Amino acid sequence: MDTLDLYNGNTGKATALVQNLAVIGGVFVLLHLMLNPPIFAEDLKLAHAPVPGLTIDTGQTYNRILNEISPEARTKNFDESIRRKYPNSLIKTVTSGVKHVKMTKYYDGKPVRINLVEIDRKLASNFEIKPALSSTTSNLKSRRTITTIAKNTNSIVALNGTFFKPQTGVPLGTLMIDGKMYTGPIYDRVAMGITDDGFTMARVQLDANIKSGKQVIKIDNINQPRMLSTHVIAYTSEWGSKAPASPKYGTQLAISGNKIIKASANPLDIPKDGYVIVGPKSILSKLFGANKVKVTIGTTPDWKDVNHIISGGPYLVKNGDVFVDMTAQKLGAIGGKNPRSAIGYTAEGNLIMVAVDGREGQSVGMTLMQLANFMKNAGCINAMNLDGGGSTVMYVDGQVVNKPAYKGGIAISNALVLSEKSELAKAN
């Protein structure tokens, strides 16, 4: 029982009002100190000097501070922001800080059906955003429907992820989950990195090597198809039980416990606790007889604080500007109006996930430039295209919400999901 109710039924309300006024008063005091800092003796000579480039917007500052100290205020501002950004749309609250928006826009007089999810990570603090493989055993050669992926990961939102090889399901491009690099980049395509409290986006290169004593050999890729016979590629147990064939004049080294346990020109079994390095014998022979080897894996740019990476391409928005680099990322084959999937993030750190239906009379799809302008208008400071066409599919709150050509969506290799954090993650 609330003790205050024993005295007066309105006392609790009055107390809450006083508390709210105290919070707001505290905000104004803080703002006053920010805008009118005390002047100390050593500051006197600068007291009347303007600060170059300083612009103060007290309204924005007030809202930002209020958002940090009041979840209710942040929720209200998020709700209002969504309504302003997406007028004449059907808006649904999936959970705190997660909005699903359905809309139809017209381009050249033709309709385009769009499903969008925007996520405020601070409001949705019990959930995490990360890529997910279709296989529950981390087998790269796997494909499943997005509904299966979402249910296996206990996710409330899922969007199809990066490109993949249709014959096998192996992701094509950078994919890192919980700090583990499953596949490396192709053509240095753009990728989004996910940190504990934000996002980053750039074209990514692999920075990896295998070292023994003074011998350092570059690793060109991880669990990816061979582009050149001169490349050195590492294959882990997620690839399968056996490494692919060696290139001409090539060799393979099976490594377990930082030791080379076998060398052969023929495909080797991949140790469950290790990997197989495949490349030209002229390069890998430098490691023959080594007592111990060490593999180091990183990226350029150096994303040490990034927990997860998902790649796509091309860029759609870069540093606030529309930027579509199809040719640079060797993606000329995906032009025209098509179903599209995209992700991006705002200056406030909100994630935006988009699925565009296409190839039908009621929704003709988008060009990449149309998609880029849409993502910018949605507030993205950085955004990128994901696998599209027949792969485009979005899952929200228990069901597929867009209308892919194949009901429920085709089986896909991987997805970007919003799932409830584990109890351990919540504690941290």
Image: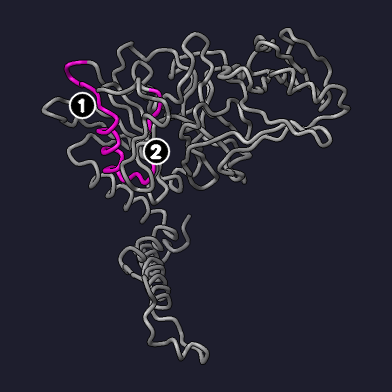
Q: What residue type is labelled 1?
A: Val
State which region is magenta.
360-387
The verdict on residue 372 being magenta is yes
Mark 1 neighbour class, 10 Å CA radius: few under 14, some 14 to 19, many 20 or more: many
Q: Position of residue 36 (x, y in %)?
A: 39, 81
Viewer-nearest residue: 171 or 212: 212
- Residue 119: give x, y in percent of width and height: 39, 41
Q: In this view, does 420 lie to the left or right of 255?
A: left
Helix, strand or loop at mark 1: strand
Q: Residue 425 at what x, y percent from top left?
A: 60, 40
The reply to whether residue 96 is in sight is no
| Residue on which the image places disc 1 | 112
Identity of the residue drawn at 47% across and 61% down: 3
Mark 2 to mark 1 CA distance (whole Å)? 26 Å
Q: Nearer the viewer, residue 39 or 234?
A: 234
Residue 103 image-quadrant placement:
top left
Q: Residue at x 21, y 21 (%)?
A: 364
The crowd level at tag 2 (other Cα within 10 Å; few <14, some 14-19, many 20+) is some
Of the numbered discs 2 and 1, the one sitting upstream in the chain is 2
Reading the image, the residue beneath label 2 is 95
- Give 105 or 220, whichever is nearer the viewer: 220
Q: In which quarter of the view is residue 89 placed?
A: top left
Disc 2 marks which amino acid? Thr
Q: Is residue 17 above or below residue 319?
A: below
